[in-house]
Amino acid sequence: MPAIISTGIFLMAIVINTSQKTVLGNELLKSLKFIQFESPDTVRSLLSALLAGTISLTVFSFTMVMVVVNQAASNYSPKVIDEFISKTVNQVILGIYIGTILFIIVSLTQIGDSDNFSEAPHFNAFGSIVLIVICIALFIVFIENISSSVRINNVIDRIFRQTKDALKKSTGETSDKKHEVKVWYPYYAKNSGYFQRIVKQNLLLILKDNQLIIRIKPYYGTYLLHNHILFYLNRKIENEGILNKIEDSFITYSGENIEENYFYGFRQLREVAVKALSPGINDPGISVICLDYLSELFSIYIALEKKTTLPMRMETYVFF
């Protein structure tokens, strides 16, 4: 996102500079006295000062982000830093900072050596002033956003809410049919990776169409190894197409996305609680808050476990 925003502002600088050189642009410049500057040297001095200030502001903002990321990784858990980096507000602000720098650089390159009034990029100079005012306002927002992001209560509450929402979305379809399977046929994973979730509708449709009963070996968050047991079926399937479709329903990738897999929310709250008890932090109050949140999440987990046929835990069965 920062690259898109900065590129857009860069192109805007080129368009504004080109528009000033048109007949309509010259007439508009003459009618707008408040954006006129005395000479190209005045514009050059102004833009140089604005460029230096914007670069300093950008460097300071990037430094703050790195300090926050390091603090979060040290005090809480390295897994919570993705939230700070991927937050839309921070990306937009940094994109505008970089775009403003590019805007001013483009404006400086358009200043000629002559003292002709029309040679000065008046529109671009005024646009640079507007962008600097916006950057200063965004810097205030950035400071407030960063300071609130490192508050441990906000971090824990965010993990709790995301996990709670993911849990409530994890219920699967149930079946009243009862089956007794004497022989289970194992099938092995063709790929390795962290078991994130199941595409429920696809899996249930395949099982229903082929009159299959599946017994899922791993649970969410476990690492699947190549050629290790992934699931069992009630009968032997020779059709590779059916087996590939079933395995394609198992989503694996690296990383911990709580919205996709509620298991990671439990893990992150546990890690924050343990980290808070370390000698370097020694804040048992944080651990108590994590335990309270975990208690509520486990109560939701137990209630949902009775309603779902998908892998809340190991050795899950899906009947059709």
Image (tube, rainbow, N blue to C red):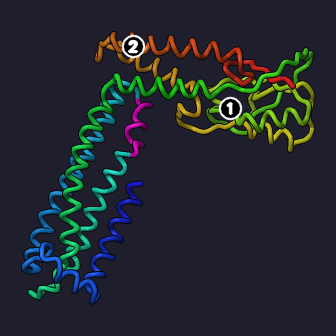
As drawn, 89 above or below 217: below
Kind of residue at badge 2: Ile
Q: Is residue 53 left or right of residue 173?
A: left
Task: Rate crowding at label 1 as few (under 14), some (14 to 19) or many (20 or more) other CA atoms within 10 Å.
Answer: some
Magenta extent: 78-88
Could you say where residue 129 lies in the image, as x and y percent from the top left? 18, 64
Image position, residue 26 (x, y; %): 22, 86
Residue at 36%, 26% in the rendered image: 154
Tell me which residue sits at (79%, 37%) in the image: 246
Return the mark for residue 289: 2
Q: Secondary structure at mark 1?
A: loop
- As shown in the figure, which amino acid type bears the numbered disc 1? Leu
- Give the quadrant of the C terminus: top right
Quarter of the N terminus within the rendering: bottom left
Q: Is 19 placed above or below 287 here?
A: below
Residue 56 x %, y %: 18, 53
For mark 2, give the secondary structure. helix
Farthest residue to the front: give it: 31
Q: Answer with the quarter of the image where residue 17 lies.
A: bottom left
Q: Quadrant of residue 130?
A: bottom left
Q: CA distance from mark 2 to mark 1?
A: 35 Å
268 relative position to 113: left or right: right
Contact between marks 2 and 1 (CB within 8 A): the answer is no
Disc 1 marks which residue? 225
